[in-house]
């Protein structure tokens, strides 16, 4: 599975846009970039997933350049409730077996 | 009702005791997983099961065992608990579609004294 690298922590203020970048230099052709969010003492929650270019949903946007060696999770106008750990995963999409490999994630702290 | 439930939510036990953590899901998924999380770290996979007759070891299976009693139930056992098994344990489930995401339970906080 492709190894992902992301910043350990980030700080922001309410109302700002937050961009978290993830590096995945060894991503495979059939890997999808998937982001999860985890609040303290809760299980991770799926946020967004994409293969290339841009994906947007009601929570976030995901930007993946053509070479797919990195990706950026964009959270528009964050609020205090967005304080959480964000995990970037390169998820293998094939017909075989798979399990998620979580790194340490990015701890986002949103200040008032 | 929650899609993935775990019992107990909190448990304190003593070294050497046997303990079982239970997980149930109402998603109708075939695949289920057990992870542990230590403070400040990501999740590590303990065991996973892709159907009732399939059990696989994950990254850190030593000291743990599992049982897949039914499609909806997957339990994790610590045969003889030790203090370094103190952690937050999560159960997760997903379907067989390639784009399915994993759904996680609320976690069980286990303390081994």
Image (tube, coloured by chain):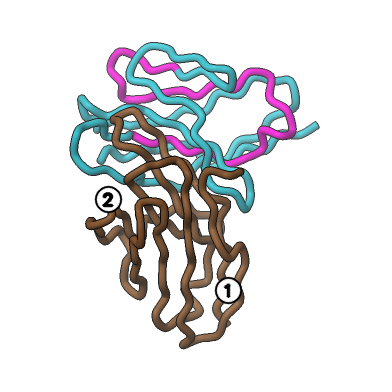
Chain colours: A cyan, B brown
The quarter holding residue A58 reads top right
Q: Which residue is depicted at the point 55% across and 56% down? A: B107
**Disc 1 chain ID:** B
Which numbered dot is residue B51? 2
Q: Which residues are magenta?
A: A63-90
- Badge 2 crowding class, 10 Å Cα cut-off, few under 14, some 14 to 19, many 20 or more, is some
Question: Marks 2 and 1: which is nearer the front?
Answer: 2
- Badge 1 crowding class, 10 Å Cα cut-off, few under 14, some 14 to 19, many 20 or more, is some
**Disc 2 chain ID:** B
Locate the N terminus of chain B and report the quarter of the image it occupies: top right
Q: Which residue is depicted at the point 54% across and 58% down? A: B6
Horizontal and vertical percent position of residue A42: 59, 49
Residue A82 in the magenta stretch? The answer is: yes
Which numbered dot is residue A63? none
Residue picked out by circle 1: B111
Establish if B110 lies above or below A73: below
Residue B38 in the magenta stretch? The answer is: no
First of labels 2, 1 by sequence position: 2
Horizontal and vertical percent position of residue B24: 47, 54
Q: Which residue is depicted at the point 32% across and 32% down? A: A24
């Amino acid at each position: 599975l492709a190894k992902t690298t992301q910043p350990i922590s980030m700080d922001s203020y309410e109302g700002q846009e937050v961009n978290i970048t993830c590096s995945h230099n060894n991503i495979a052709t059939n890997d999808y970039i998937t982001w999860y969010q985890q609040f303290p003492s809760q299980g991770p929650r799926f946020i967004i997933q994409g293969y290339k270019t841009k994906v947007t949903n009601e929570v976030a946007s995901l930007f993946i350049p053509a070479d797919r060696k990195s990706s950026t999770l964009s959270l528009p106008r964050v609020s205090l409730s967005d304080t959480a750990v964000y995990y970037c995963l390169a998820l293998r999409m094939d017909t075989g077996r798979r399990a998620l490999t979580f790194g340490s994630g990015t701890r986002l702290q949103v200040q008032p | 009702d929650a899609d993935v439930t775990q019992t107990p939510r909190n448990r304190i036990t003593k070294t050497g005791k046997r303990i079982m953590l239970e997980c149930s899901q109402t998603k109708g998924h075939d695949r289920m997983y057990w992870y542990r999380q230590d403070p400040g770290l990501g999740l590590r996979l303990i065991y996973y099961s892709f159907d009732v007759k399939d059990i696989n070891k994950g990254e850190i299976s030593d000291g743990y065992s599992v049982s897949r009693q039914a499609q909806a139930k997957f339990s994790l056992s610590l045969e003889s608990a030790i203090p370094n098994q103190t952690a937050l344990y999560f159960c997760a489930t997903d379907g067989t579609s390639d784009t399915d995401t994993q759904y996680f339970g609320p976690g069980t906080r286990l303390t081994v004294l």
